[in-house]
């Protein structure tokens, strides 16, 4: 038996408030974490929406002054047993009374990194490697966490030796660790030759700039009786705020990490490998107007209307639509002979040229599905709570396009990034997972709005939204969607105003009579569920 920290990759997000909310976790009971056996209840393995700090339903993502709450990454310690192949055979969270000595090491290495899609280094006015490390890397240091309440232990570093940068906060509660990120503050240093004030920022590379995103290592020592053990460490990533937290990406970061670190042959199941992807794509309609227009009833038959046929390998209509849908998916290596002229979904790829493909593992499952080589059993595989924590944390993040990326860069595609399934190798330095992203992040956040017929990351950075107008039915008025980032005119404007933008949240509308329950259709999506923009502080 050994001790491990889970999730193995936790996600914290920026916000301006002292207050926080809890990031996505599986919908388990507290007792499930301590039972030691795999969970087989599908509801408990689903992702639970973000929760308030006290683990109750979250009413608002803003505090009483209008500032965005920060998303906390919560880490737990598990006593884990694995067989010779590394498969978990038992896992239970340690009791709250367990003595645990936690530490956190955050860093931001963006200013010292290679340029994204360019020759040479960022900030080339400093070329000595040791000087670059000292002046351009914002290091929070390895911080033993002794605080027991939020805000009591800040994690800070310095940029260019003198400028303090708050990377986050950490504290413990029982045997658990909580990590918050920074406040979303970015700035520039004249001595490092940033772009002149009147010039636009580059989408990725801006000398003299810094921001307070980061990533790093979470570690712990566990004392049981007179014995002390080093727990298997984990990682934390501090990412931009997710403005559509209950809309999922076509390809998630879990899919990317699975492909790179855990891919293995497995049979294809409609409800495990196919339907979730179709459902994720369908939610884009709430954050991207062209997707909503394509869903209107007068255009064509939607897959949601024949979901039962798609799950039945003996259904001729389902077989026809399976082949049709697969023909629209781009090949992972661009070998698109025989594909439809319009590849879907309309997202840019990693090179800003084609359409984002599925991972190889995902593509093979869709290939088998199109060839009627799948099963439609609704039985699920059990999962230990520690595994569910790993999965849910990454499912809430974008798996591309990595141009350069939202929460992480394309380093997550590389097999050498991991030393086992979903576990970052010790050779990856604190700050290295995020160093290839835009600096400041707001520059890319502004520029990566929908272009022509393709989008970037609408599940985190919406393109279009429905306004909160209770007297109207959003699902029947696609032409009334509006630009989400209206009121922001350029990259520097985004640096100043990003935290005032609206949040896309789900809402039920009556579909039969007032007070009626939402109608669950065969696709597994509530027809009575709509998503609207709320809590916007920036005037339109």
Image (spheres, rainbow, N blue to C red):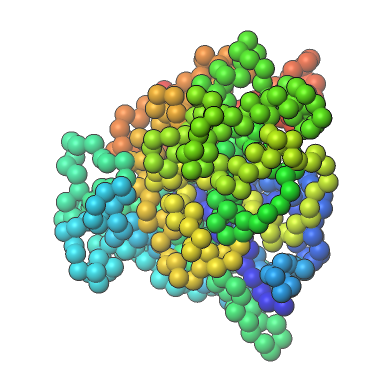
Residue 337 vertical position relative to residue 209 in the rendered view, above or below: above
Residue 171 vertical position relative to residue 260 in the rendered view, above or below: below
Residue 533 vertical position relative to residue 123 in the rendered view, above or below: above
**Extreme-bottom residue of the structure:** 226
Residue placed at 65% from the left, 38% from the top?
366
Residue placed at 56% from the left, 41% from the top?
358
Residue 16 located left or right of residue 270:
left
Quarter in which the C terminus is drawn: top left
Quarter in which the N terminus is drawn: bottom right
7, 473: nearer the viewer: 7
Q: Determine if residue 243 is in view.
A: no
Residue 33 located left or right of residue 326:
right
Q: Where is residue 353 in the image (x, y as percent from the top left)?
A: 39, 35
Which quadrant would residue 514 be assigned to in this image? top right
517, 119: nearer the viewer: 119
Residue placed at 16% from the left, 51% from the top?
193
231, 401: nearer the viewer: 401
Residue 513 located left or right of residue 229:
right
Which quadrant would residue 36 be assigned to in this image? bottom right
Residue 328 vertical position relative to residue 201 in the rendered view, above or below: above
Q: Where is residue 73 in the image (x, y as percent from the top left)?
A: 57, 56
Which quadrant would residue 227 be assigned to in this image? bottom right
Q: Determine if residue 90 is in view.
A: yes
**Extreme-top residue of the structure:** 298
How many marks do you count on the picture? 0
Residue placed at 37% from the left, 56% from the top?
435
Q: Position of residue 2 (x, y in %)?
A: 68, 77
Q: Position of residue 513 (x, y in %)?
A: 79, 15
């Amino acid at each position: 038996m050994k001790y491990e920290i889970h999730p193995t990759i936790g996600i914290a997000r920026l916000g301006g408030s002292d207050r926080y909310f809890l990031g996505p976790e599986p919908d388990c009971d507290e007792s499930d974490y301590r039972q030691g056996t795999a969970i087989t209840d599908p509801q408990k393995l689903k992702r639970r929406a973000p929760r308030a700090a006290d683990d109750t339903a979250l009413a608002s993502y803003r505090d009483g002054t209008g500032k965005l709450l920060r998303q906390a990454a919560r880490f737990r310690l598990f006593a884990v047993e694995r067989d010779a192949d590394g498969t978990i055979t038992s896992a239970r969270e340690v009791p709250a009374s367990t003595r645990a000595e936690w530490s956190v090491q955050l860093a931001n290495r963006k200013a010292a990194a290679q340029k994204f899609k360019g020759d040479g280094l960022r900030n080339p006015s400093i070329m000595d490697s040791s000087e670059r490390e000292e002046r351009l890397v914002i290091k929070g240091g390895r911080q033993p966490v002794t605080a027991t309440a939020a805000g009591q232990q800040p994690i800070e570093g310095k940029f260019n030796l003198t400028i303090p940068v708050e990377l986050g906060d950490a504290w413990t509660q029982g045997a658990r660790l909580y990590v918050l990120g920074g406040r979303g503050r970015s700035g520039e240093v004249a001595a490092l030759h940033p772009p002149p004030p009147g010039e636009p920022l580059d989408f990725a590379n801006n000398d003299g700039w810094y921001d307070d995103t980061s990533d790093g290592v979470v570690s712990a020592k566990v004392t049981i009786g007179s014995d002390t053990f080093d727990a298997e460490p984990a990682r934390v990533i501090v990412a931009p705020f997710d403005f559509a937290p209950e809309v999922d990406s076509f390809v998630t970061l879990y899919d990317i990490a699975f492909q790179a670190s855990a891919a293995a042959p497995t049979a294809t199941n409609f409800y495990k490998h196919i339907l979730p992807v179709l459902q994720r794509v369908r939610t884009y309609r709430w954050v991207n107007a062209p997707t909503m227009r394509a869903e209107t009833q007068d255009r064509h038959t939607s897959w949601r209307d024949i979901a039962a046929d798609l799950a039945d390998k003996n259904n001729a209509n389902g077989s026809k639509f399976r082949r049709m849908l697969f023909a629209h998916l781009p090949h992972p290596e661009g070998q698109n002979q025989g594909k439809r002229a319009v590849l879907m979904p309309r997202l840019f790829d990693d090179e800003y040229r084609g359409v984002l493909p599925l991972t190889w593992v995902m593509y093979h499952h869709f290939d088998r599905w199109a060839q009627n080589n799948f099963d439609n059993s609704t039985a699920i595989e059990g999962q230990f709570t520690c595994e569910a924590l790993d999965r849910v944390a990454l499912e809430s993040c974008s798996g591309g396009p990595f141009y350069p990326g939202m929460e992480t860069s394309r380093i997550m595609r590389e097999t050498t990034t991991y030393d086992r399934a979903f576990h970052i190798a010790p050779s990856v330095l604190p700050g290295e997972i995020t160093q290839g992203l835009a600096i400041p992040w707001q520059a890319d956040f502004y520029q990566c709005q929908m272009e022509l017929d393709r989008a970037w990351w609408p599940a985190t950075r919406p393109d279009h939204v429905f306004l909160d107008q209770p007297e109207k039915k959003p699902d029947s008025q696609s032409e009334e969607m509006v630009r989400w980032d209206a009121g922001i005119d350029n990259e520097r404007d985004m640096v100043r105003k990003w935290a005032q933008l609206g949040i896309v949240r789900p809402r039920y509308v009556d579909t039969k009579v007032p007070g009626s329950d939402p109608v669950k259709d065969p696709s597994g999506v509530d027809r009575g569920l709509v998503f609207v923009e709320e809590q916007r502080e920036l005037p339109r």
